Amino acid sequence: MPGNTVSSSRDRRPVFLNLAQIALPVGALASIAHRVAGVLLAIGIPLGVYALDLSLQGPQGFARMAAALEGLPSRAAVVVMAWALAHHLLAGVRHLLMDIDVGSRLPEARRSAWMVNAAGLAVALLAAVTTW
Amino acid sequence: MVKRGPSGWLAWIVQRASALYMLAFLVAGLLWFLVDPPGSHPAWRARMAGAGTGIATAAFFAALLAHAWVGLRDVVLDYVRPRSLCGPVLAGLGLGLVAVAAWVLRILVMVRA
Amino acid sequence: MRLSIFRFDPDRDERPYMQDFEIALAPTDRMLLDAILRIRTLDDSLAVRKSCREGVCGSDAMNINGRNGLACVTPVAGLAEPVVLRPLPGFPVIRDLVVDMTRFFAQYDSIKPYLQNDEPPTGKERLQSPRDRARLDGLYECILCACCTSQCPSYWWNPEKFVGPAGLLQACRFIVDSRDRATAQRLDDLDDAYRLFRCRTIMNCTEVCPKGLAPSRAIEAIRSAMTRRPR
């Protein structure tokens, strides 16, 4: 531009990063679910320790813990935590195996990611059915 | 684009080693509960009061908290902006995990009382 | 064929927009690059990098229906329409499908992509057995197209600190090269919280590499090398 000694176009470089428009391969789904599950489990740590504390305090503590798990919100939370533990554990095992070069080639990695995703949901379904 | 700060490899090894121990503990624990379930509350307390169980459980929680630290730290380093917030957030998380460790220690000691 | 293409001209546009095209392909238009060049005969304002047209220069890397690839080796047949073309994710857009590759190349430079060996060579060349040469297979073929690095979420979140799949694959190429003597320094240089260890083995990189390479496996190999080295 005449009279303009500093190029301004460099400041106006947009970036395409709309996640809704970017592909999510099966491994990426397994990975983000692994992270979400991990964060959920981390939030669950104090709750789990509290449950352990109650369960060891005496029969009343134990009964209180059992009673707290009766309501629908608690049962829903148990199902979510069951999914979180199952997915995080299975996805973690998948990572440990890939660390020693087992299943780290693309076709095998896609298959194992699909299996981990499905197994996590299966465990959640099982938890839902057994706590019904 | 130069290397800065503490070793990433050490954190990665801690994450993997703690995962392996927890996996072994959970599998062993699950088997023990399925094969020989504690029938009553006193039986449950007695089981948790055993010296071997106590040490193994303490080690499990040490592994759990170390594993959670590495994982949560990764989440913070990936997403938290502005970067100046990373330090305080990590400090808060660290404090929380240490508090849980103290709580677990207290539970495991009290059950033997 | 219907396409929807990302447009942005810094001299004219406030913000990017998508432009729809409908073109008749000639029978010889087999690859996506052919379709793009045919569009340019109607609208030559569309900016795109291209050169070799055979998948070895890496110029025409772009996001095709959500997944990065090289336009010149992506067959037109089998593409879901409208074919959505966008620039490589996360990279600053200079114009239309042309992105700023500066930081990508800076990360590559930072891993010192050259043999480091101060020993005097015995004879005319530094000899390498066929077996040692084979260890470079799957690593040397990288064309630095940036399909992998721009599909990596870890790189999106930390592009100035995480080296990225392409840079790390090249780091591995020099780490395993029997003629290089700087292995310890190379491993040490990658050992902080960011340069290598942002990698979560998401494997988007290996999914999209147009040369069929596996940066995720190369990164695993570097972690193994770090674990095995004497302390």
Image: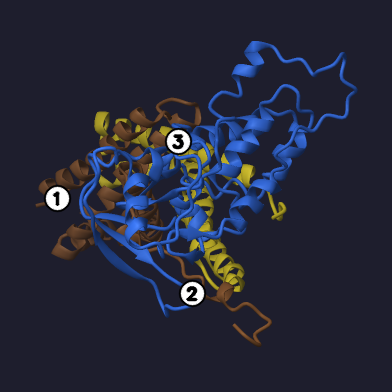
Query: Which kind of residue does numbered mark 3 sit on?
Result: Glu
Q: Residue at x 42, y 78 (%)?
A: C13
Q: Chain of mark 2?
A: C
Helix, strand or loop at mark 1:
helix
Report the chain shown in brown: A
Q: Could you tell me how far apart the alpha carbons at marks 2 and 3 are, in whole angstroms?
A: 30 Å
Q: Residue at x 32, y 60 (%)?
A: C42
Task: State the mark number for residue C10.
Answer: 2
Q: Could you tell whether C189 is left or right of C135 in the image?
A: right
Query: Which of the two labelled residues, at mark 2 and mark 3, occupies the earlier sequence position?
Result: 2
Q: Quadrant of residue B35?
A: top left
User: Drawn colour of chain B?
Assistant: yellow
Q: Residue at x 29, y 32 (%)?
A: A111
Q: Quadrant of residue B27?
A: top left
Query: Which kind of residue does numbered mark 2 sit on?
Result: Pro
Q: Residue at x 60, y 43 (%)?
A: C167
Report the chain shown in blue: C
Q: Could you tell me how far apart the alpha carbons at marks 1 and 3 are, in whole angstroms?
A: 53 Å
Q: Could you tell me how far apart the alpha carbons at marks 1 and 2 are, in whole angstroms?
A: 54 Å
- Identify the residue at the far bottom of this view: A3
